[in-house]
Every structure is written in structure tokens, then in C-alpha cells.
Amino acid sequence: MSKRLAAIVSAGLSKFGKRDGLYARELFAEASRECFEDSRNLRPSRDIEALYVGQMCESYEHQAHMAPLMSDWAGLGHIPAVRVENACSSSGCALRCGIMAIMSGMHDVVMVGGVEKMTHLSTQKNVEYLAMASDFQFEQRNGMNFPALYALMAVAHMHKHGTTEKQMAMVAVKNHKNGALNPKAHMQKEITLENVLSSKPVAWPLKLYDCSLITDGASCMILTKPSIAKKFTDDPVYVTGSAQANDKLNLFERDDLTSIKATQLASRKAYKMAGVRPSGIDLAEVHDCFTIAEIIAYEDLGFCKKGDGGRLIEQDETSLQGRIPVNTSGGLKSKGHPVGATGVAQACEVYYQLTGRAGKRQIPDAKVGLTHNIGGSGATAVVNIYSKR
Amino acid sequence: MTTQPQNQDLFQRDTKGKVVPTIENFYRFCAEKKLMGVKCGKCNAVFAIPRTVCPKCHSAGMEWVQLKGTGKLLSYSIVYVSTPEFQGQTPYTVGIVELDEGARLSGIVRNVNNDDLRIGMNLVVDFEDTTSQEWPQWPRYFFRNP
């Protein structure tokens, strides 16, 4: 049996979507209330010793110093609270801060979470704020933004491996099919290949339906020292592998445009820690900020050979019925991508799946899950592995 | 120092009068229509964007080197939805170019028809006459057909 790094005893998500009239703190309060109700015996103000909360961009609400605000609105009193910012991997990194706090022995019970309020601003403003996660001096100033950066990877992948726009569209169709079964998802509706292929161009070859959603949402979970987990739930899930790797912020200076090296490095470490191979993963939540990102993730995480990602989706291997179901929640594509909330929201889905509470999208007998959270165009990658045992 | 800047007052210099390898100075060279990269005096690594410390060997001996400004297109995209700053230019083409010296750079590609874009095509670096709207009013480089 692999070593248990930390236990997840409870999780909560706000409804993801266009949450008019609600701001980050209100969304976080909604998620935290669900999280508190999910655990027996948890008295938040007595038990929770620290909060690590991911949030990307203070410009959205002209609000820095988010952590004490989130802590206050969750009713956590005077505990140390820290905001973690690593672009779209902010709460993936916050989750790792929680894991490390438990492993260090400093804390026995911590809360981790994430939040982003985005939909009150225009698409252009969102493109600008999200682009802040790329290099201002050399990428943003010279016309880059996130759809463009992932499009550069897509074109390189198409050229080198023969990946097609249709294969990318299949990722969107699959994830919307899953999201239609998730009551928390932003867009709970199925779409067709034709919808994707005929949608408006954003950054060729990426079209509107290749892009994840601009979403409001919050996520959180309670982590404990493994030995006390059963005090809070009969059904804990254990983190058995956790790794982060980074790379140059600039896409153009990286060795290979067709893969994300940080994912390869982080996943290798996490698999080794958990004592599991890619074939031992029952389901995965991967960072599908754009459809090409999911195809590249298949390859970098070892679900298929390098260059075979397009064929993996084409052969239906990653659907709910497939060999390795990916993004059962609907992913960033359909559940939505409130950037700061995403990393922990992915972990919430794996927690629900491993505890048999994923409703109509439940993977039967799921025992081992993986999450993969990317910051920017791949300068940060966080990979965590979870197990029921 | 191989290059004598014409606009001497604007460059940041060290105490010996040498132009320091900073980002501001990179863009000031762009105003003089020069693509200046840096080369590590210790390990000879070349970068298209200036650094004060070599990321490969951690030496501080980074020296300016003028790049030829010729290279090959590694990947490209046509941008339809942009940040507000580039809204007036959509749709525009962006690319990543590997320069002949081995260093890479990304930026806007001008005056190439969409149908003519090919990975591996030759491009050259050129410079805008106008400055960007935001501080500190630096001109941009871009790529075009040779």
C-alpha cells in the first residue's frame, strides 16, 4: 500500500455558472457551507486550523488580500489564511499547500479551496486578465493571449502528429455530454460535432466551442491527518501522490510545443509516490482549458503514446464508458473554469467519484483517481493521485 | 560592445558606460531597428530576450549580440478575439520563430496571406515605426516575409 499523505474528509462546490449579483466571498461561503454539512463531527471554528485558498486575479473585483475575506465569510475566525496565486493552477497549488501543512505535522485539519468571479466583465476584459498569466514583456505586448498560445500548440501538434480539428471537437462533445449529467456544471447541455466545428473562430484552429467557459464559482475541501480521518467521515479518500513541476513562463522558449514538460515531470513524480502506473488510474480530471490541452494531457500523463492523443478520443477511450474516463465532471469545458477554483474543483470530482456520490456520471467501482491542473500555457503543472485505500 | 547606440541618453548603462542587458534596453534597440539578443560569456548560450543572469550556468556575464533577424516559423495562429489593446488589429497572425542563431521569439506576423502560412517558412524580423500605446511607449518587433 502506498503512503497516505493526507485524507480528504469533506468537499463542497458552489453552483458553477453565471452567478449574477454574487461576488467571490458569497460564492466561497456557498461552497464552504456545503463542505461543512458534508462532514459529521466537524465543527469548523474548533477544528479547522488553517485555510489555503487559490484565486488568480485581483483585478476582477479590485480586491487583493482575498484570504482573510474568504476565511471570514466561511466563518473561520482567526486562523491563518493565505491566498495562493499560480494562474489557473492557483487552487491546485493551494491544495498542495494543505497537503504539505498536514505532512509537516504543523496542522491536523486544514481547509483548501479556490474561487473566481469572472462573468460580470466582458469577454475582452477576461481575455486581458487571463493573459496576465503569460509574459507581459514578450508575449502579451506582442499580441499573445491564451487562446493564441494554445492555438500555437495545436498547430504544432497537428503538423507533427496529424491531430485534426475534428478530434479536438470530439473532446468538447464528450465533456459536454458528461457536464449534462452534473448538476453543478455551468453548461448542462450536450453539443454536436457540427456545433463545435461551425462555431466562431477565436484563435484558429481553436473555435469558441474549443474553449473552456468564463465562469463564476468556488470550491473547497477539508484535509486531515490520515490517522484521524475516520472521526469526520466513514469514507475518506487519501492523497497518495502529489507533485508540481514548472517550466519557462514563455511558451516560445520551451523545448517542445507539442507537449507540456511540467505535466510529464509532475506526473512521473506523482505516479512514483503513489506506486501506481497510468494504467492503474480509474478516472482523471485533466486541465481542458482548450480541447487541444486535453489531447496533450492524455499523452503527457501516459494514458497513450506521444502523438496518439487524437486517436484516444476518436476511439472513445476517455468517455464515461471508456478505458480511462477523463473529465467526468464535464471538465473546464462544460462544468466551467472559474480559474482560481478549478484545481480544488477537480479534486472534489475525484472525491465524489471515489466515494460513490457522482450520481448519473458515476464510474462503477472507481478506486484510484488523478487530477491534473495547469497554470498558464504550462509553466506550472500540478498532478495529484487519490485512493480509497 | 559591438553596437554604438544612437540614442545614448535613453539607454540604461552600468558604471563603465556599457548598455546593460535589460528588457527596457532590448526595446530601445528595437526603436533603432536592431534585434539584440544576449550571449553568455561563460557558456555561450544565446537568447533572443535579454537576461542579466544566464539561466543555464548562472553567470552574470551576459553580453549583447546583434541577431540577424532571420529564421523559420515553428507554429502560427490567426487571432480573432484579442485583448482590448489589439482589438483594432483583429484578425491578426501570430507565430513562434526559431532564429538562425537558435534562439526563439514569438510575435505578430504581418503581410503573409493566411493560405501562405507554413510551418518551416522563412521569415525576417522587422520593427514598427509607431510605439505601443502603453508605457513606456516601446516599439514592437514583428515578423514578415523576407
Image (spheres, grey):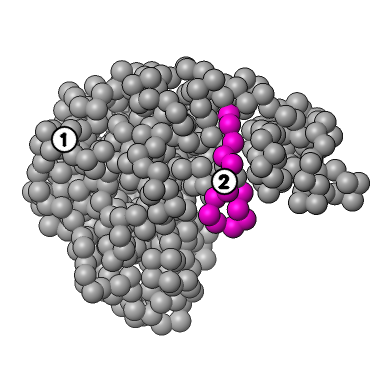
In the rendered view, tell whether residue A3 sits above or below residue A42.
Answer: above
Residue type at mark 2: give it.
Thr
Who's the residue at 50% across and 22% down the image? B145
Chain under numbered label 1: A
Q: Residue A99, position in %: x, y?
A: 44, 56
Please, what secondary structure does the residue beneath circle 2 have? strand
Which residues lie in the magenta part?
B125-138
Who's the residue at 26% across and 58% down the image? A215
Where residue B140 sits, quadrant-wise, is top right
Instruction: Give the Cα separation between the discs numbered 1 and 2.
Output: 37 Å
Who's the residue at 23% across and 57% down the image? A235
- The residue to which callout 1 is attached is A198
Q: Mark on residue B130?
A: 2
Lateral position of residue B26 relative to residue A117, left or right: right
Q: Which quadrant is home to the N terminus of chain A?
A: top left
In the rendered view, tell whether residue B83 sits above or below residue B106.
Answer: below
Looking at the image, which residue sits at the far front? B129
